[in-house]
Amino acid sequence: MKDETKRLLERTFNFGVNYLLFLDNLPKKEKYRVSKYQLAKSSTSIGANYEEAQAGESKKDFTHKIGIVLKETRESNYWLRIIKAVSKNDKNVDSITL
């Protein structure tokens, strides 16, 4: 396995872990419920799909799985933007930097 692939496997794994830890620190308010759930799913899916892509049965299968990684990354960005917008009026959340 190439060094770059190993680094990306580690980075995508850490991305999911870091966002789960981040979500744990958000208030347990209804307004965060859906976005926390969705971000937990999409952020951990990035690493899972990148890991799965390494076992692609063909170049086409690999490319398809990497496309899913991109979609999950974009979805994670969306949910982070939602959380940031919602938290602007929440005095219990420090400024969220994206």
Image: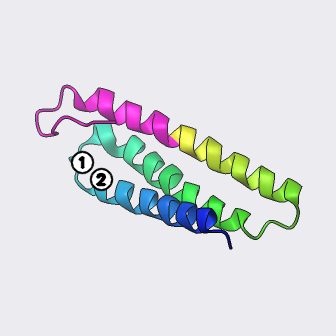
Q: Is residue 39 left or right of residue 53?
A: left
Q: Name the residue nearer the viewer: 18 or 91.
A: 18
- The residue at the point 47 percent across, 37 percent down is 77
Which secondary structure, mark 2? helix
Three-letter residue code for mark 1: Leu
Seen as rendered, the residue at the extreme left is: 91
Quadrant holding the C terminus: top left
Q: Name the residue nearer the viewer: 42 or 2.
A: 2
Q: Nearer the viewer, mark 2 or mark 1?
A: 2
Residue 69 percent coordinates (x, y): 63, 50
Distance between the Cα atoms at labels 2 and 1?
Answer: 7 Å
Q: Quadrant of residue 14?
A: bottom left
- The residue at the point 88 percent across, 63 percent down is 58
Residue 90 percent coordinates (x, y): 17, 32
Whether residue 83 appears in magenta in the rendering, the answer is yes
**Dot 1 crowding, Cα within 10 Å, few <14, some 14–19, many 20+:** some
- The residue at the point 49 percent across, 42 percent down is 76
- Identify the mark at residue 22; answer none if there is no mark: 2
The magenta segment: 76-98
Quadrant holding the N terminus: bottom right
Q: Name the residue nearer the viewer: 97 or 31.
A: 97
Seen as rendered, the residue at the extreme front is: 3
Which secondary structure, mark 1? loop
- The residue at the point 50 percent across, 66 percent down is 10
Q: Quadrant of residue 88?
A: top left
Three-letter residue code for mark 2: Phe
Residue 7 percent coordinates (x, y): 53, 64
**Dot 2 crowding, Cα within 10 Å, few <14, some 14–19, many 20+:** few
- Identify the mark at residue 79; answer none if there is no mark: none
Q: Which residue is identified by label 1?
A: 26
